[in-house]
Image (spheres, rainbow, N blue to C red):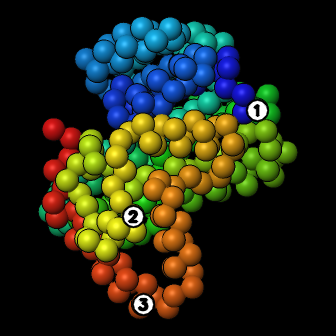
Amino acid sequence: MDLSGKRAIITGGAMGIGFATAKHLIKEKCTVTIWDINGKELKRAKSELESLGGKVFTHICDVTDKEKVYDLAKKAKKEMGGTDILINNAGYVKGGELLDQTDEVWEKTIQVNLTSMLYTIRAVLPEMYERNSGHIVNISSASGFLGVAGLSVYAATKWAVWGLTESMRYEAWNNGKRGVRWTSIHPSYLSKGMFEGAKLGFLGNLIVPLVKSHDVIARAIVDGALKKGKYSVRRPRSLRLTIILRGILPDVWFQKLMILMGVHRSMETWRGRA
């Protein structure tokens, strides 16, 4: 996709991966609309992006509020003239074993990480189908391939995001809308931000090192997903070994390998965003 002149909505775009992606899209001469629940960070993001010469619209949005999502999607169409790109980046994580947190915490995890995508996709997809053009990028996770202790409900949502993205790609094909593209993004633990402190064991970190910055994922979104049209982008790239090894190894061997890599204890040092 030639990004010049394209119009993008980014959820959770005031910080982290979303904000880093917005900066890259501005550099590609895109118009960007950012939705985020944090008004203070939205204001800061808008100022910085406009200083780069970008055309930016910002709106406070709780993506679990479907009426707000549908209303803001209409507003984005008026402000930008349409939506060519949707980046479903908004996310929520709360560590702990299943019995450690309340039902409400796990319900919020599902609502933010998965259910909200149904709203955002439904809000922009009819327009993309009408043009037979557009790209929807959904942020999944390395935990979309693996079960992780202390991250069970989060991991469940990210497995679901991968399945949703692939299923929607086939739905688009069946409807003769191959011009509408779909990509899932699978970052491993980032050294800063929502997963600060989480890490694999010595062997695991050698094979799948921490992602150094949000910019690494932003470049994967812009260059790998949007420009090259890749279906599934993983960072670090060594994450693809997870799929290969799960396919060729007996289950018991694969599970033992994950334990050797320290996957099962990787959330024990998690601190999260300050």
Residue 59 shows in this picture? yes
- What amino acid type is highlighted by mark number 1? Ser
Secondary structure under the numbered disc 3 in the rendered image: helix
User: Which disc is residue 208 wearing?
Assistant: 2
> At which x and y percent is residue 265?
22, 71
Secondary structure under the numbered disc 1 in the rendered image: loop
- What amino acid type is highlighted by mark number 2? Val
Q: Of callouts 3 and 2, which one flags the residue occurring earlier in the amino acid sequence? A: 2
Residue density around tag 2, few if under 14, some if 14–19, many if 20 or more, within 10 Å: many
> At which x and y percent is residue 139?
48, 46
The quarter of the image holding the C terminus is: top left
Quadrant of res 164:
bottom right
Residue density around tag 3, few if under 14, some if 14–19, many if 20 or more, within 10 Å: few
- Comparing 210 with 118, the one in front is 210
Measure the alpha-carbon separation of dots 1 and 2: 35 Å
Q: Residue at x 43, y 60 (%)?
A: 142
> At which x and y percent is residue 6?
66, 21
Secondary structure under the numbered disc 2 in the rendered image: loop
> At which x and y percent is residue 120?
53, 35
Q: Which residue is mark 1?
A: 133
- Comparing 170 with 33, the one in front is 33
Q: Are marks 1 and 3 in contact (CB under 8 Å)?
A: no
- What amino acid type is highlighted by mark number 3? Trp
User: Which disc is residue 253 wearing?
Assistant: 3
Image: 269 above or below 8: below
